[in-house]
Image (tube, grey):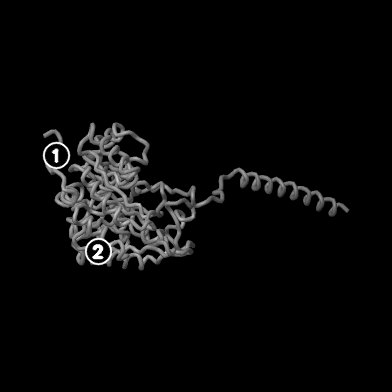
Amino acid sequence: MNLLKRFLIYLGILLVIGGLAAYHVLTDFASTPYPPDMTLEVFHPETPGNIPEHRVWQPKYPVIDIHSHPQESGKTPDELIKIMDASGVRAIVDLDGHWGWTGHRIQRKLEEYNLKYPGRFILFTKIDFGRYKNPDFVEETLQRLEESVRWGVKGVKIWKNLGMMYRDANGKLIPLDDPRLDPIWEKIGELGIPVLIHTADPVAFWQPVDRFNERYEELTEGGSWFDSYANGDYPSFETLMKQRENLLRKHPNTIFIGAHMAELGHDLKRLGRMLDEFPNFYVDISDRAYELGRQPYTAREFFIQYQDRILFGIDLYPETHVYQDYYRFFQTEDEYFDYPRYYYKHGRWKIYGLNLPDSVLQKVYYLNAVKILQLDRKLIENPSS
């Protein structure tokens, strides 16, 4: 009986001690921070590496931004000029010269820009392919182009809708190389102005939106800028590339500028072959630093080899911090830093600086644009002269 009593006492003591130990373990576990489940949207790791950083506040040379939409900023020319002056930007190309009623919108915009800031804002016009079903569309467009150039327009902007969305009277997509449009491209060449043409989108937009698509995060956010073409009535990426090549081949006397590295920033070998074959073809770098900066050795060689065919631009509208991010990308050897406008989440990677030679910087920043747009070089280099 004494043995049983002692056993029960010991057992009770052990249970009490075990209970206290279990309580301590459970309360300690409950109070210890633990990574919660989180979405990819909020995941933004900070790099612990001690990597040198060289901010670039001003470019080495004057800058002409050939790809801009300043009207979308909602800012006045006075406000835009302050941003441009703070960023070392001598001039920007406004790609949104809408015709309006009898051309009055273009005339009014030119007057607004040139009244106080002649030479600082360069206007391109657009072609309204939504009027394609009008039997007088081509003749009307030729007339508008002539009048626009007479007023002071310096180029034409073509958006990706051509080739992907615009349809003719029979409901068929209008291809880029549609022979019915040949008189328009020929007229532009005769007028001596360039066509800045946005063809397609990044190739990932045609790939399945799954865990293998590096633009998954961007494509699943939705919005008109970030559409997937994997499932829909759209031409393939390759079809659009071939249509553009045929367009360049048919109109050798017209200068075409491929927006966004011609959507071939992921394949610089192919882009190089295009530049070799078509001397009337140029590219702008707008919103593609994220593609170029993750292949810095290849990109640097590309810029040196094709330094006469590349134009500077940032897309959207003037922003000082964005310009400075581009200057850092072009002028330094900084490593593993966020690409310009990283917050748009084009992809989860970092970029590396190209540290381009001065002679290349000078051409990319402004000399190539001066040549193509037939600007006064002296006014760009010495605006007070």
Secondary structure under badge 1? helix
| Residue at x 65% of width, y 44% of height | 27
Q: CA distance from mark 2 to mark 1?
A: 32 Å
Labels 2 and 1: the sequence-earlier one? 2
Circle 1 residues within 10 Å: few <14, some 14–19, many ≥20: few
What percent of the width, then of the height, locates residue 249? 23, 66
Secondary structure under badge 2? helix
Which residue position is annotated with label 1?
379
The image shows residue 20, relative to residue 200, as above or below, that is above
| Residue at x 24% of width, y 43% of height | 122
What percent of the width, then of the height, locates residue 278? 21, 64
Indicate which label's residue lies in the foreground, 2 or 1.
2
Q: Given the image, on which type of amino acid does mark 1 rest?
A: Leu
What percent of the width, then of the height, locates residue 128? 35, 52
Query: Which quadrant holds the C terminus?
Result: top left
Circle 2 residues within 10 Å: few <14, some 14–19, many ≥20: many
| Residue at x 32% of width, y 54% of height | 158
Q: Can residue 333 be seen at all in this image of the molecule?
A: no
> In front here: 266 or 105?
105
> In front here: 270 or 38?
270
Q: Is residue 307 left or right of residue 107?
A: left
Q: Can residue 178 be seen at all in this image of the molecule?
A: yes
Which residue position is annotated with label 2?
248
Q: Given the image, on which type of amino acid does mark 2 rest?
A: Leu
